[in-house]
Amino acid sequence: MNNEEIEKFLTRQNITDEMPVKIFFKQRAPLSGIFVKGRDFEELKEKNFWRIVTDTKHAEWLRLKSIDIARIFNGTEFSKLENKSRAAIKQQ
């Protein structure tokens, strides 16, 4: 995906720093996490890089709020994004 598609998804779905997103990749298993809008968000976004805290590190993120916990992913590796909270509502 390109940065415009990802940004459009984040805006349209009204994704905040605390909302989980399921990220599907072209070459690897999907993961869930939150997009972190740190001080370098705009700079990374222009290059199609995204700082994401995965579900496995979510508790640590809530406790420390350190961007060092996040990993940076290249948006070109994404194949699809899904709002986890909306997906959970649809399944009920």
Image: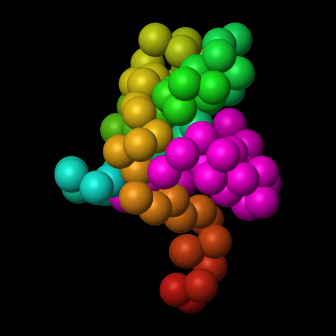
Q: Position of residue 53 (x, y in %)?
A: 47, 32
- Numbered marks: total: 0
In the displayed structure, 51 sits above or below 87; it is above
Q: Is residue 11 magenta?
A: yes
Q: Quarter-wise, where is residue 47 in the image?
A: top right
Q: Is residue 83 above or below residue 49?
A: below
Nearest to the observer: residue 64 or residue 48 = 48
Which residue of the protein is positioned furthest toward the left in this rendering? Answer: 28
Q: Is residue 6 visible?
A: yes
Q: Is residue 11 left or right of residue 3?
A: right
Q: Residue at x 54, y 15 (%)?
A: 67
x and y, in percent, of residue 55 in the image: 41, 43
Colour mapping: rainbow
What is the x, y in percent for residue 22? 46, 57
Residue 55 at least partly seen: no
User: Residue visible at 68% across and 37% down?
Assistant: 17
Which residue is nearer to you in this view: 18 or 7?
7
Q: Position of residue 91 (x, y in %)?
A: 52, 86
Q: Is residue 5 left or right of residue 55?
A: right
Q: Which residues are magenta?
A: 1-24
Residue at 41% from the left image edge and 33% from the top image edge: 74
In the image, 75 versus 19, the foreground residue is 75
| Residue at image point 41% right, 43% down | 76
Residue 56 shown left or right of residue 69 in the figure? left
User: Which quarter of the figure has residue 14?
Assistant: bottom right
In the displayed structure, 32 sits above or below 47; it is below
Q: Is residue 36 magenta?
A: no
Q: Is residue 64 left or right of residue 12?
A: left
Give the quarter of the figure containing the C terminus.
Answer: bottom right
